[in-house]
Amino acid sequence: MLTWVEKYRPKKLRDVAGNPSSIESLAKWAEEWKSGIPKNRTILLYGPAGTGKTSAAYALASELNYDCIELNASDTRTQDIINRIVGSAAMQDTLDPSYERKLIILDEVDGIHGKFDYGGLAALKKWVKESLQPIILIANNPWSLPREFRALTLMVGFKKIDQRSILKVLMHICTKEGIETDEKVLKMIATNANGDLRSAINDLQALTEGKKKLALRDVDALTMRDSELKIFDTLIRIFKTTSADRAREAVWESGEDADTILKWLVENAPREYEDASDLARAFERLSRADVFMGRIMRRQDWDLLPYAINAMSAGVALAKQHKYSKFVRYQYPQIFTLYAQTRKAREVMDSIAEKISRKNHCSKKDAKAEYFPMLKIVLNNSAEMGSQLASELELDLEEIQFFIKEERLAKNIYSQANEISAERIRASTTKVKQFSLGEF
């Protein structure tokens, strides 16, 4: 199933939401190519995530019917790869007026550096200057690129999308998908997105999964589960990108502890990576991150944290060799559910151990090791003796059920134990009265 971001990606520049002046600059640059090679052969679209940069690039290609050559951020943007893919397309030209131009699109260009992309930026610089075909570069942070590189491009900035434009897109999607809702609900989603249209569309798709009606209470959960949504955003940024820097930033900017993010990644990697080799590499990196986290916890050596984060973020992002555009409904880690289920059992165990240690003057550890096995045997095999012990230890029904799985037997012993305790109290009260009367 396609994500709605992909499904409703605009086909015309006029349909791109927000940033009208930026869209106009892009259209003007494209128009110049119709009459020859313009001064700036390359345009650099930059700005925050979810502001329409990539959508604008593909809308332009669709509108002008250009053959699109795409090179996403990856661990294979070396000099050779850039020259082979970008160079071969950039140098194609023809005098035939019916010839279809090629549009070269490089996303996350600010991530081209490091050992994975050796020589890539230098090679790209050559084609930015000499290309016979239009090139669109896309970046979140263009200032990380060398000044001389930026000077070769026409820089066009994209700002956060206004709430009204986001709302219009959400209403359009709801109409197309047959989702019943009202403007107030969609306004909450638009506001929560903070200018990120992609985030707003992803939230809408997640909230309406499996239903055709979106109520205000559903969106209330959006605010209530803000932390969970931040996790979702972090997962998307790690799983979808192939930029090591972007992946690392996703973890550092999430506000969540690394161990929590690691558990979410382990749970959802099989849902995201369909290729067995991609998944195997991802789990190898996650395993490495887990080793580092274990050492951090045991030794309190927090200097190892950057290594753990690098393995779980950049490592997982660069593990894939395939592009995954599908919508994935990320799942809450099962291990958290298991913790929640076992936490109650641990609390009951501690309560029983505390009662045993108080009665028998032993440690709770010894109570669990030595008395628990005996209690289980007695309670399951002798209702009479079990009732006496339960009364003596003042066990409640939940504590008795910890040892006895048969509900009827557990309730029977609990009832008898209460009767024994009540009888003991009555007997004690009678003795006190007799003693008091005897004083006179």
Image (cartoon, helix red, strand yellow):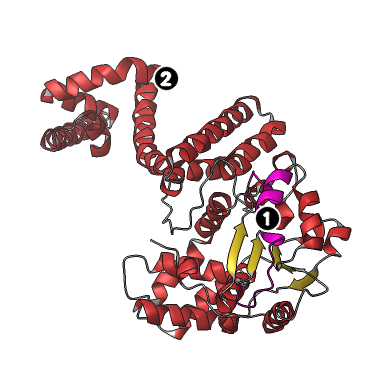
Tag 1 or tag 2, which sits nearer the N-term?
1
Quadrant including the C terminus: top left
Quarter where residue 289 is shown: top right
Q: Residue 32: tell me if it is visible.
A: yes
Percent x, y of residue 70:
60, 59
| Residue 286 in the image, given as x and y percentages of width and height | 54, 35
Q: Per the image, is 96 magenta?
A: yes
Taking the view exactly as shown, the residue that stands out farthest to the top is 370
Relative to 253, is 186 on the left or the right? left
Residue type beneath disc 2: Lys
State the residue at coordinates (71%, 55%).
87
**Vertical arrangement, residue 393 with respect to residue 228, above or below:** above
Q: Which mark is residue 365?
A: 2
Label 2 CA crowd tier, 10 Å (few <14, some 14–19, many 20+): few
User: Which quarter of the picture shows residue 145?
Assistant: bottom right
108 is within the stretch colored magenta: no
Q: Quadrant of the N terminus?
A: bottom left
User: Looking at this view, is 422 or 383 the one in front?
Assistant: 383
